[in-house]
Amino acid sequence: SNAEAMAECAATVLAVKPQVMRTVAEGLAPALDAHPQLVISIAAGIREADLDRWLGGGRAIVRCMPNTPALVRSGASGLHANARVSDAQRELAEHILRAVGLVVWVEQEAQIDAVTAVSGSGPAYFFLVMEAMTDAGERLGLERETARLLTLETALGAARLALESGEDVATLRERVTSKGGTTEAALRVLTEGGLPELFDEALKAAARRAAELADQLGADDT
């Protein structure tokens, strides 16, 4: 049973769909009364106060927003701890989540909405860009598989260079953009087409929707 399993644990990770989190949490409350411990939630859109209420109150909770590259241990997770989480429990949460990639802490829970917009949903933005680049390469005459491999390796290499060089990405972009060259021509089209502004609006929309979902999921129907 959950109660028996939790008796042997220092932390419980809740990795269920947000729509069923309330039912699951309320079912775990008695076990947490008997065996108090850290609760790590990786359910999108569930605020700490709502989860704490469903768990019976007074719980140590870390809220985490991971992303799908965690499947290949290259994820990026944003974490926030409520006031009841001890330093040792913070270290435990970080140790657990580091197994699947980068871990960063945010100071305010509301910042999890921004984490959701940047990294939680972020892989889909890059997949869309890679899809568009592959399609464009094919239209330019490349075999689709060739265009796909070139696109994926370029994306991977660019990310690795940005991480390992320590340089600001704007500096790296400027360094590869020769005046009057091919890169400058391509970037001009993207910039004049409003790409930076589109990303700003897209991330705002994602963060706004994250907050809306949290409001809906946390509504007390009782």
Image (tube, rainbow, N blue to C red):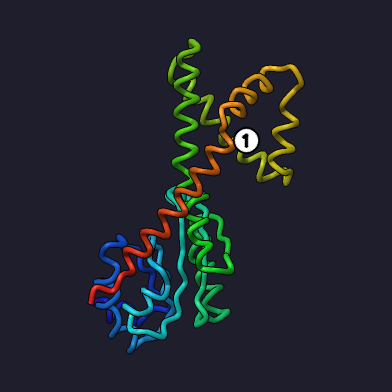
Mark 1 Cα-neighbour bin, 10 Å: few <14, some 14–19, many ≥20: some
Q: Give the amino acid type for the residue marked by disc 1 in the picture.
A: Ala
Residue that appears at 67% across and 39% down? 161
Up/down of 56 relative to 157, above or below: below
Specify the farthest residue to the top: 141
Up/down of 212 relative to 123, above or below: below
Give the image quarter of residue 94. Answer: bottom right
Up/down of 71 relative to 197, above or below: below
Tell me the element at label 1.
helix
Is residue 20 toward the left or the right of residue 176 in the image? left
Q: Nearer the viewer, residue 129 or 32?
A: 129
Up/down of 84 relative to 207, above or below: below
Give the image quarter of residue 63. Answer: bottom left
On the image, the x and y values in percent for residue 162 come to 67, 41
The N terminus is located in which quarter?
Answer: bottom left
Residue that appears at 62% across and 21% down? 186
How many numbered tags mark residues here?
Answer: 1
Q: Nearer the viewer, residue 161 or 56?
A: 56
Give the image quarter of residue 164. Answer: top right
On the image, the x and y values in percent for residue 88 come to 55, 79
On the image, the x and y values in percent for residue 32 come to 34, 84
Residue that appears at 45% across and 80% down? 60
Is residue 202 toward the left or the right of residue 154 in the image? left
Residue that appears at 64% across and 26% down? 187
On the image, the x and y values in percent for residue 118 come to 52, 50
The C terminus is located in which quarter?
Answer: bottom left
Q: Which residue is mark 1?
A: 158
Q: Nearer the viewer, residue 143 or 212?
A: 212
